[in-house]
């Protein structure tokens, strides 16, 4: 008995999932086939997707002799012919619901990710690894295509719905020709032409994958991204000669970042710091060519050295690449007027960071005194018109202050803390490479800005001074495991309760309680 072709479409808000469903119904009707579509709305804040279920009968009306097939309104577990999704984790989630099957379902998925709320809330790196998601997709599909749909959209200037339509057409799932699909997209408008370009890119890509059957069976990763500036970054020859080849790709990115951040001299400081770690690691483990301690530290060291301050923010906001990106995101056309306003609210800590230590301390004491008297911390809200000559000049002037950054109090503070961390890694590596690796991984604690950044540095210093320091009560053979568990606890909750419990369990003191002013607020309902 001929059965309808069942398709489940999954799209996030604003991606045109409803438009894609309408297109497929129009394609079927244009070709003379019965079709039906229903939708189930998703929820906001990236905790799900809007799904659209379609059934298309494989025989045209001309062969049914006036009879009409009965089409379903919702998907049945294990009975899907195709699962098409614009987000990788959403694809795996629908497979987890039992909708796909290894003996029947064609899975077409984007390789891109839109982080869920739960992933964003994690203090550490809460992203789901892509490898297991791709394994799930391959294990529960008869055939599958994983495409870099975001890149195809960028190349064609269209939304992902047109790319998904091209992938479906190229898969050969439906008994329609390419002309049937293109007929519903055709039109004189620029949007229609962009949709046709996105359709063609996806159609050709999936067609090539189908023709290369042996390759299709091995598709476990996204399509190779377009070459970018970061992909071609290489270390200078004199620097590359100092380090094993395994470190060169990441160090190339870090070296370029620090040159842009502060200049070649600052990048040389980064290289000198890593040379110390390589020397320590070579002395402790001469036969380990991978240099895991240095490899781990190289990433976090570069991120820490390129700490965010008001100079860095002004530089990023005033770059031409940002204006280009914003113009593309809002789809600004020639002749359109685009205005971009940047909002700043620098407080005393941000301003004090640019001043020498003595002036910075005086300014911070003044602000703390204000807070102790019940006043709010001082801040200066600013609204800068990025599109105006005055606004751009203001941002570039602020960005040019990077030459004065080494004279500021925060620069000196950050460099001192970085040196203490690196010295701890150096000493630990010479005693135990496993301990040095765990201390290098503690660089993950330094993230964010404001109080989050300060809390991460306090946690790292507490580990250095009380878990592995000379006065540590933790036995040396247990320190590597202790640091690993304490670091994981520090990333679990913002309040640090799990961290304090982990410290006490391993014989280290809990973090000291910080002074906080007690503010008495007047009851607004009571008249003076």
Image (cartoon, helix red, strand yellow):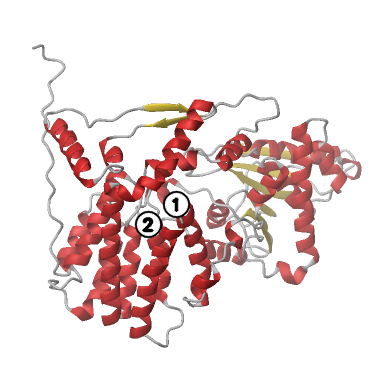
Q: Residue at x 59, y 40 (%)?
A: 325
The disc at residue 196 is none
Q: Indicate left or right for 69 with 376 as reference.
A: right
Q: Is residue 138 visible?
A: yes
Q: In this view, does 335 lie above or below 79?
A: above
Q: Which of marks 1 and 2 is nearer the N terminus?
A: 1
SS assignment at label 1: helix
Of residues 329 and 494, the one nearer the viewer is: 329
- How crowded is the residue under tag 2: few (<14 C-alpha within 10 Å), some, or many (20+)? many
Q: Is residue 72 visible?
A: no
- Residue lying at the far top of the rendered structure: 527
Image marks 1 and 2: residues in contact by CB distance under 8 Å = yes
Q: Residue at x 66, y 36 (%)?
A: 18
SS assignment at label 2: helix
Q: Where is residue 390 in the image (x, y as percent from the top left)?
A: 49, 26
Q: Which residue is drawn at 30% across and 62% down?
A: 488
The disc at residue 261 is 1
Q: Where is residue 306 in the image (x, y as percent from the top left)?
A: 40, 53
**Res. 425 image quadrant:** bottom left
Q: In this figure, which residue is indicated by the disc labeled 2?
A: 305
Of residues 33 and 508, the one nearer the viewer is: 508
- Residue lying at the far left of the rendered structure: 528
Which quadrant of the figure contains the N terminus?
Answer: bottom right
Q: Where is residue 173 in the image (x, y as percent from the top left)?
A: 77, 54
Q: Position of residue 40 (x, y in %)?
A: 58, 38
Of residues 97 and 353, the one nearer the viewer is: 353
Q: Indicate left or right for 10 with 433 as reference.
A: right
Which quadrant of the figure contains the C terminus?
Answer: top left
Q: Indicate left or right for 168 with 241 as reference.
A: right
- Real-space Cα separation, disc 1 to disc 2, in angstroms: 9 Å
């Amino acid at each position: 008995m001929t059965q309808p072709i069942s398709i489940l479409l999954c799209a996030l808000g604003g991606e045109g999932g409803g438009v894609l469903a309408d297109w497929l119904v129009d394609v079927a009707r244009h070709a003379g086939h019965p079709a039906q579509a229903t939708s189930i709305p998703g929820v906001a804040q990236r905790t799900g997707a809007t799904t659209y279920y379609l059934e298309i009968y494989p025989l045209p009306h001309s062969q049914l002799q006036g009879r009409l097939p009965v089409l379903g309104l919702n998907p049945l577990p294990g009975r899907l012919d195709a699962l098409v999704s614009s987000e990788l984790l959403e694809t795996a989630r629908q497979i987890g619901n039992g909708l796909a099957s290894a003996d029947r379902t064609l899975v077409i998925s984007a390789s891109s990710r839109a982080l869920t709320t739960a992933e964003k809330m994690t203090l550490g790196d809460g992203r789901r690894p892509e490898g297991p998601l791709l394994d799930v997709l391959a294990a529960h599909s008869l055939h599958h295509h994983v495409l870099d749909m975001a890149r195809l959209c960028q190349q064609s200037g269209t939304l992902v719905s047109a790319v998904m339509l091209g992938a479906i057409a190229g898969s050969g799932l439906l008994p329609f020709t390419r002309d049937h699909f293109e007929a519903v997209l055709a039109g004189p408008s620029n949007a229609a032409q962009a949709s046709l370009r996105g359709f063609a890119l996806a159609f050709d890509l999936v067609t090539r994958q189908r023709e290369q059957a042996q390759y299709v069976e091995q598709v476990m990763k996204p399509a190779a991204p377009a070459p970018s500036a970061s992909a071609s970054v290489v270390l200078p020859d004199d620097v590359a000669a100092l380090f094993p080849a395994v470190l060169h790709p990441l160090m190339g990115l870090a070296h370029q970042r620090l040159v842009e951040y502060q200049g070649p001299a600052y990048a040389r400081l980064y290289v000198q710091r890593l040379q110390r770690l390589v020397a320590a690691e070579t002395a402790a483990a001469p036969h380990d060519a991978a240099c895991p301690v240095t490899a781990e530290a190289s990433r976090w060291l570069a991120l820490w050295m390129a700490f965010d301050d008001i100079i860095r923010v002004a530089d990023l906001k005033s770059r031409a690449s940002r204006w280009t990106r914003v113009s593309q995101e809002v789809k600004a056309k020639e002749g359109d007027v685009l205005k971009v306003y940047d909002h700043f609210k620098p407080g005393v800590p941000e301003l004090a960071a640019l001043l020498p230590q003595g002036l910075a301390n005086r300014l911070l004491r003044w602000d703390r005194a204000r807070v102790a008297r019940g006043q709010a911390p001082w801040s200066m809200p600013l609204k800068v018109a990025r599109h105006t000559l005055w606004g751009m000049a203001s941002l570039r002037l602020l960005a040019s202050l990077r030459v004065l950054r080494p004279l500021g109090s925060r620069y000196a503070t950050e460099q001192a803390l970085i040196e203490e961390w690196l010295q701890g890694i150096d000493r630990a590596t010479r005693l135990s490479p496993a301990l040095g690796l765990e201390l290098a991984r503690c660089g993950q604690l330094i993230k964010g800005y404001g109080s989050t950044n300060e809390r991460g540095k306090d946690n790292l210093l507490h580990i250095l001074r009380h878990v592995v320091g000379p006065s540590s009560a933790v036995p040396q053979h247990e320190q590597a495991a202790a640091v690993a568990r304490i670091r994981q606890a520090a990333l679990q909750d913002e309040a640090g309760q799990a961290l304090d419990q982990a410290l006490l369990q391993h014989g280290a003191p809990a973090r000291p309680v910080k002074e906080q002013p007690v503010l008495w607020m007047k009851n607004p309902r009571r008249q003076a």
